[in-house]
Amino acid sequence: MNAMNEQSLEKEYKLLLQSSKKLPGEKRNRSENINNNSYLERQSQTESNARSYPRRLPFALTQAKGIYLKDSDDNIYFDCLSGAGALALGHNHPVVQKAIYSTIESNVPLLTLDITTPIKDQFVEEIFSILPKEFSKNAKIQFCGPSGSDAVEAAIKLVKIATGRRGMYAFHGGYHGMTNGSLSMMGNLGSKNHIPGLMADVHFLPYSYTYRCPMKACESKCNLTCSNYIENIFNDVESGIVKPAGLILEAIQGEGGVIPSDDEWLRQVRKITKENDVPMILDEVQTGLGRTGKMFAFEHSGITPDVLVLSKAIGGSLPMAVVIYNKDLDKWTPGSHAGTFRGNQMAMATGIATINYMKENNLLDHVNKMSEKFFINLRKIQSETSSIGDVRGRGLMIGMEINNKAFDTATGQNRNGELARLIQAECFDRGLIIEVGGRGSCVLRLLPPLIINEEQVDQVCSIFSDALKEAESKFS
Ligand SMILES: Cc1ncc(COP(=O)(O)O)c(C=O)c1O
């Protein structure tokens, strides 16, 4: 990585850590965090009951740099959540800050609806430059309201208008956002059980979740039983399921529990959709921009989608969402998808800075090296415990599925999600931020900034190991 940026980050790290109370790895006592507790109390009085992260990560944040967060009681944390994967270069990276300062100083209009500007023009060029040629040469881009969910809504409209069909195929375990259309394509039932009037005509298909194969057909490798089943749905004239406007999926399910699809499985799904003239929408909101060790997760299997949904990291820390699609689908009419905040110049400038940094510093190589180190460390930890059933993922999108066999034998009950949440809490109390996801929240998730260094990988794993041991001892 660029030595100058690295040095400046190291210097700022030192400053942040010097003025701290507890460093990552040092245990803290929540009741002693007077400032955090006061902010949390005020937050609980004014903010919605729907708030989520503060319940598992109970602190108030004051500063952040790279992988580090500082709370209002001056405790430091390793941030392995990175704004749910949005902060590719971590917090306040020098190149991102520079892009923000120079955008402000240049007096460009900060918001331009979807009117073009030199910054927007350059952003489009940069995004197209990192897409596989066979996709970008025929592609068009639609800027959306700056959330992943809004871009998913746009993608649904795009394919419905282009095909004249009404249904969508989605996957068990999928996550595409919280708006009406995107929520209706979500696997998790908790968020949709009580919502009437979700988008109709969504049909769910089995995903290649090899560790818990939905067809009970796979051991350690996907044997394509579920993609054969999907093929049959398309080919059986009595399947009862009408041909959809589009099929949407994540190449690696994120919120669903960090489940990488099998490459051959994904190629087969691509082949089936092509043969049946059904646009394939890849939702790379979480996996896009280097997270998985390639710029886009679909590149691992060598396929190209018809529609690509991007958000999170492409805004280089600021809100941004786009849909990029094959121009044969460009049948919608002016205004078919609009939104006020589609022209955030600052987010385009930080997005450009992030892409350039990644290219200039060969960040993908670094991601793959750090990933390898993580997997070696975590698999060693797995071998020393009976709680971690599976360690999986790609690049720096890593999941550990808790599967403590002792639970079933001892109590006849599965308490894996409960243990996962306790491990998360023990990590938090030692200054490590991780997330949970998957069925019953039983998957521990790591989404560190892509600039994490070797020493930090070792420290994160060591804190995780301590937290795991403590959580296990509380369960025995
Ligand atoms: C794969 C995927 N799609 C869509 C979304 C929704 O994005 P947003 O939360 O910005 O609406 C997310 C959010 O985590 C996601 O992971």
Image (spheres, rainbow, N blue to C red):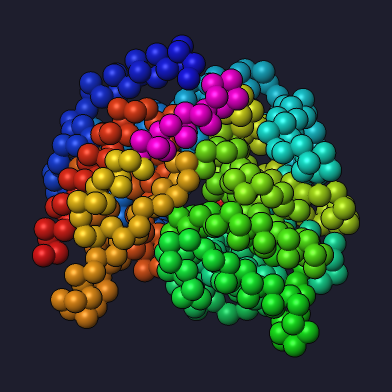
Residue drawn at (82%, 57%) of the image:
336
Q: Percent x, y for residue 454?
A: 34, 28
Residue drawn at (55%, 57%) of the image:
262
Side of 117 where 60 appears, left or right: left
Nearer to the camera, 375 or 137:
375
Nearer to the camera, 138 or 149:
138
Q: Is residue 264 visible?
A: yes
User: Splitting the image into 4 quarters, where does residue 59 fall?
Assistant: top left
In the rendered image, the vertical position of residue 306 relative to residue 128, given as above or below: below
Q: Main secondary structure of the magenta part?
A: helix
Q: Is residue 40 visible?
A: no
Q: Percent x, y for residue 264?
A: 61, 57
Q: Percent x, y for residue 10?
A: 35, 18
Residue 371 is a magenta residue: yes
- Give the magenta part as a residue range: 358-374
User: Splitting the image into 4 quarters, where does residue 120 fall?
Assistant: top right
Residue drawn at (64%, 72%) of the image:
228
Q: Percent x, y for residue 365?
A: 51, 29
Residue 243 is a magenta residue: no
